Image: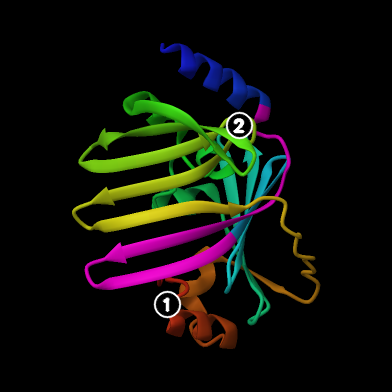
Amino acid sequence: MRPILILLAIAQFAFADAPLAPALFQTTVEQGKNKTVQTWTFERKTNQVFQTRHDRIEIWTKTGPREIALEQVYRAEKLIIEFNQGELNAAGHTNGWNAFNQLVNTNLFARLGQQSPKRVLGHNALRFKGEVDGAEWVIHWIPDLSLPALIERKDKSGRMRTELKKLNTTPEVLNLSGFERLDYADLGDMEYHPGVKKLLSKGAIHAHRH
């Protein structure tokens, strides 16, 4: 193993589950002539990760050694949609906990070339670049935060770029009193539920009929 990857593994063990105040990210997706830009925040607590976007909050929770649960909180509809591990697997979320609490599968680093480090928002960042399985990757990684400063992926379908913009933003006060909880598996039988109907019409969720 390359020396820098040994140090990286040590840093990950020490900081991967360390609490992190909300960090502001910006994600740009380009596919053909279409381009979308979205800002969002990432917050890490013990065995829990919060991703806050304009239309929803995603709460990822480590419920066991190999089990993860997801709660999607929709503020306007006052709904919480719950996903268990089996439903997440069916949706393609199979990378394991580290891909959620660190935003990137760090096993990828060993398959990329290393470049000289750089400073990002007052922290040292390791830089990786290369091609894996037909996709070109650029990743800047902050070991002492276990957090990416940049993730860029480009392939024949388009380009995705996620960049860290700010650290230590003000956390949102989350009050879920009065919210209705629904199991994702039940949504296919609830197309007439006002909140579910609205989310389905916007394409925010995809229900499976029984």
The amino acid beneath tag 2 is: Pro
Residue carrying label 2: 65
Answer whether residue 2 is magenta in the image.
Answer: no
How many numbered marks appear?
Answer: 2
Span of residues in magenta: 15-40
Mark 1 and mark 2 lie on one chain; the one further toward the N terminus is 2
Give the vertical position of 93 relative to 39 (above or below). above
Closer to us: 78 or 160: 160
Residue at 46%, 74% in the rendered image: 188
Residue at 33%, 34% in the rendered image: 129
Residue carrying label 1: 203
Residue 177 shown left or right of residue 111 in the figure: right
Give the vertical position of 132 relative to 87 (above or below). above
Whether residue 76 appears in this view of the structure is yes
Whether residue 208 appears in this view of the structure is no
Residue 67 shown left or right of residue 137 in the figure: right
